[in-house]
Amino acid sequence: MPVPTVSSPSRLSKLDLATVIRSAIDETIIAFFTTDIELKVGPAIITSEGQEYQPPQAEVTAIVGLSGTMEGGVHLSAPMHTALGLAISFSGETLESFDATARDALGELANIIAGAVKERISDAIYLTPPKVVTGVNLTVDYTKALESTKCYFRTLHGPFFVEVFYNI
């Protein structure tokens, strides 16, 4: 059965939009990672109005951009060891390092999460292909007028979070 979409994301209250986003993230993560990695769902943090947007600080971040009725993107961010564990669990491959296969797996997972958000909010949201950045102390410039919903998770591989940042 198709998931109903919101007619216009701007008509939702900030809390309602955050609830829809949290649901899309949780359902997607739980669908892919069941008991095999001992997934634990943590808190969700919603930026308060007027709070300046701060991009994630992590060793690995997969990014999918959003455009159309919702401008922004999706981040899946983790320490390197967690990102490798997620890539192994998601791909089913035996990986020794965070190589091209691991990048593809993490990027695809972020893409699936972005698709779940799009499906629940509006067909008029468009996704960019995923990009995966690695390293510490990297700077990515974003407009400071973005809102975000950040959801934290813990696995036997370590912690990670998924963030949807947006301007509607």
Image (tube, rainbow, N blue to C red):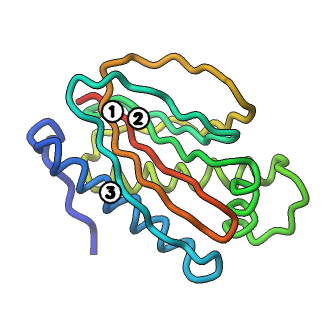
The percent position of residue 99, horizontal first and vertical second, equals 85, 48
The answer to whether 140 is drawn above or below residue 92 in the figure is above
* Disc 2 to disc 3, C-alpha distance: 16 Å
Mark before the other along the chain sequence, 2 or 3: 3
Quadrant of res 70:
top left
Name the residue that disc number 1 marks.
166
At horizontal 26% and vertical 65% (from top left) the residue drawn is 3
Name the residue that disc number 3 marks.
22
At horizontal 86% and vertical 62% (from top left) the residue drawn is 95
Mark before the other along the chain sequence, 3 or 1: 3
- Dot 3 surroundings within 10 Å: few (below 14), some, or many (20 or more)? many
- Dot 1 surroundings within 10 Å: few (below 14), some, or many (20 or more)? many
Camera-nearest label, 2 or 3: 3
In the image: residue 134, left or right of residue 42: right
Residue type, numbered disc 3 = Arg
* Disc 1 to disc 2, C-alpha distance: 8 Å
At horizontal 54% and vertical 73% (from top left) the residue drawn is 39
In the image: residue 133, left or right of residue 141: right
The percent position of residue 22, horizontal first and vertical second, equals 32, 57
* Disc 3 to disc 1, C-alpha distance: 14 Å
Residue type, numbered disc 1 = Tyr
Count up the numbered dots.
3
Say what secondary structure mark 1 lies in: strand
Residue type, numbered disc 2 = Leu
Give the number of the disc on residue 66: 2
Give the camera-side residue of 76 and 1.
Answer: 76
